[in-house]
Image (tube, grey):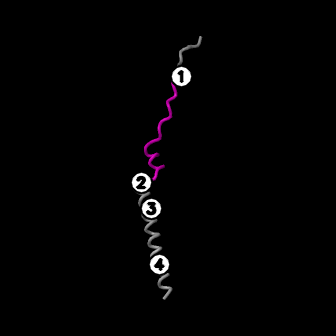
Amino acid sequence: MADTADTTEPTPAAAPAPARRQIEDKLPRGILIRVLVYVFAGHALAAFIYLLFTLGGNQ
């Protein structure tokens, strides 16, 4: 006769994502701030050069 004892092992809960995966999915705060500063500085420089050309073209 078959043994009636439960021989199945409980399935483990889903393991949390490794820390490396979480880091790769999320953009580091320092890079985000640096990109925003570069975008702002680039637009400020472009506006200044545009202003120079506009003022120089009127003379």
* Residue type, numbered disc 3: Leu
Q: Residue at x 42, y 57 (%)?
A: 31
Q: Are marks 1 and 4 in contact (CB under 8 Å)?
A: no
Give the mark nearer the N terminus: 3 vs 4.
3
Instruction: Check whether the beta carbons of the residues at disc 2 and disc 3 lie within 8 A of each other.
Output: no
Callout 4: SS: helix
Q: Which residue is mark 1?
A: 8
Which residue is rendered at x = 53% and y = 15% of the image? 5
Looking at the figure, which quarter contains the N terminus? top right
Mark sitting on residue 48: none
Name the residue nearer the viewer: 19 or 9. Answer: 19
Q: Which residue is mark 4?
A: 51
Q: Where's residue 10, x and y in %?
A: 51, 25
Q: State the SS at label 1.
A: loop
- Give the foreground label among 1 and 3: 3
Tell which residue pokes out farthest to the top in this image: 1
Label 3 vs label 4: CA separation? 22 Å
Residue plotted at (43% across, 65% down) = 38
The answer for how far apart the CA atoms under marks 1 and 4 are is: 76 Å
Q: Earlier in the sequence, mark 1 or mark 3?
A: 1
Q: Cα distance, mark 4 to mark 2?
A: 33 Å
Q: Residue at x 45, y 42 (%)?
A: 18
Which class describes the residues within 10 Å of circle 3: few (<14), some (14-19), or many (20+)? few
Question: Per the image, is 45 magenta?
Answer: no
Label 3 close to label 4 by CB (< 8 Å): no
Q: Is residue 4 left or right of residue 52?
A: right
Q: Which residues are magenta?
A: 9-29
Along the viewing direction, whichever of 55 and 23 lies nearer the viewer? 55
Q: Earlier in the sequence, mark 4 or mark 2?
A: 2
- Residue corresponding to mark 3: 36
